Structure formats: structure tokens, C-alpha cells
């Protein structure tokens, strides 16, 4: 079991589904990314930090860096967000396609494309 899978298993059971879903989305798009825990959060690295996510009481926090938030600001209007952070409430479906777009944007950014 990876560090990230252990992290998820140590969260509130009702949060597992969304946290594992986020983990699988990232793994599917960037299987070669290095996995770790940074600042106590699941972190994926590819030529630097790519994205982080974290369990919170009422939401899954997604941290795609400030550029990842700014680039998709219009599409994030339905979610609480700030510089570098997006909140996806546990009582709503994850916006999978939007998350994928953000991850791919960050990947291109980190790879200098």
C-alpha cells in the first residue's frame, strides 16, 4: 500500500470514495508521477510539484498551484477557491472532466510545453 493509500485509509470512512476517486484520476493521467506526502498531503511530482489533495471535514481540498486555479477560474465559479486551492464538497460529485483538464494543464506547465 502506498503512502497516499494509507493516508486515505486513515481518513473518515465516508470520505474514502471521493479521495480514492481523486487518487485514481491523477494516477490514470500521470502514472509516471512520483507519489509522496508533502505538508501532510498526498502529493504528485513531475518536474516539481504537480498537484496535491487533502481530506478536510466537509470537502476534498485540491491544490493545483495558483496557475491551475487562475487558468480555470471561470469553470470554478461553483466551487469555493482561493489562490492555489479548490474545495470540492463531499456531498457533491467530483467534477472529473474539470479535474482532468487542470491536471493536464499543470503537467504541460511543469514540462515546459
Image (tube, rainbow, N blue to C red):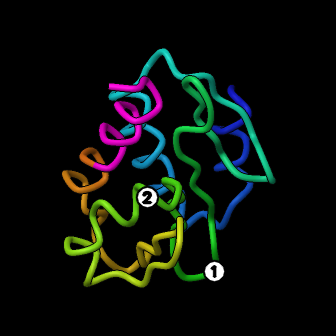
Residue at 47% x, 75% y: name it: 87
**Against 39, is 110 above or below?**
above
The residue nearer to you, when weighing 59 against 87, is 87
Relative side of 2 to 95, left or right: right
The residue nearer to you, when weighing 91 against 34, is 34
Q: Position of residue 22 (x, y in %)?
A: 43, 49
| Within-10-Å neighbours for mark 1: few <14, some 14–19, many 20+ | few
Identify the secondary structure beneath mark 2: helix
Name the residue that disc number 2 marks.
18
Residue at 40% x, 36% y: name it: 109
Q: Position of residue 17 (x, y in %)?
A: 44, 55
Q: Which mark is residue 57?
A: 1
Q: Position of residue 18 (x, y in %)?
A: 43, 58
Quarter-wise, where is residue 95 in the image?
A: bottom left
- Using the numbered discs, state the Cα–Cα distance from disc 1 to disc 2 in whole angstroms: 13 Å
Secondary structure of the magenta portion, mostly? helix
> Magenta span covers which residues?
102-113
Relative side of 33 to 12, left or right: left
The residue nearer to you, when weighing 53 against 55, is 53
Relative side of 71 to 84, left or right: left
**Against 33, is 107 above or below?**
below
Q: Which mark is residue 1?
A: none
Identify the secondary structure beneath mark 1: loop
Precedes in sequence: disc 1 or disc 2: 2
The residue nearer to you, when weighing 15 against 95, is 95
User: Which residue is outermost to the front?
Assistant: 112
Residue at 60% x, 30% y: name it: 45
Asked whether 32 falls inside the magenta stretch, the response is no
Q: Position of residue 90 (x, y in %)?
A: 44, 75
**Against 80, is 73 above or below?**
above
| Within-10-Å neighbours for mark 2: few <14, some 14–19, many 20+ | many
Amino acid at each position: 500500500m502506498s503512502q497516499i493509500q494509507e493516508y486515505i485509509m486513515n481518513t473518515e470512512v465516508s470520505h474514502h470514495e471521493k479521495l480514492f476517486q481523486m487518487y485514481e484520476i491523477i494516477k490514470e493521467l500521470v502514472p509516471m508521477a512520483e507519489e509522496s506526502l508533502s505538508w501532510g498531503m498526498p502529493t504528485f511530482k513531475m518536474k516539481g510539484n504537480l498537484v496535491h489533495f487533502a481530506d478536510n471535514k466537509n470537502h476534498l481540498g485540491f491544490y493545483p498551484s495558483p496557475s491551475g486555479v487562475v487558468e480555470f477560474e471561470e469553470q470554478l465559479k461553483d466551487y469555493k477557491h482561493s489562490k492555489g486551492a479548490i474545495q470540492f464538497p463531499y456531498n457533491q460529485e467530483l467534477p472529473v472532466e474539470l479535474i482532468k483538464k487542470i491536471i493536464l494543464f499543470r503537467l504541460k506547465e511543469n514540462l515546459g510545453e
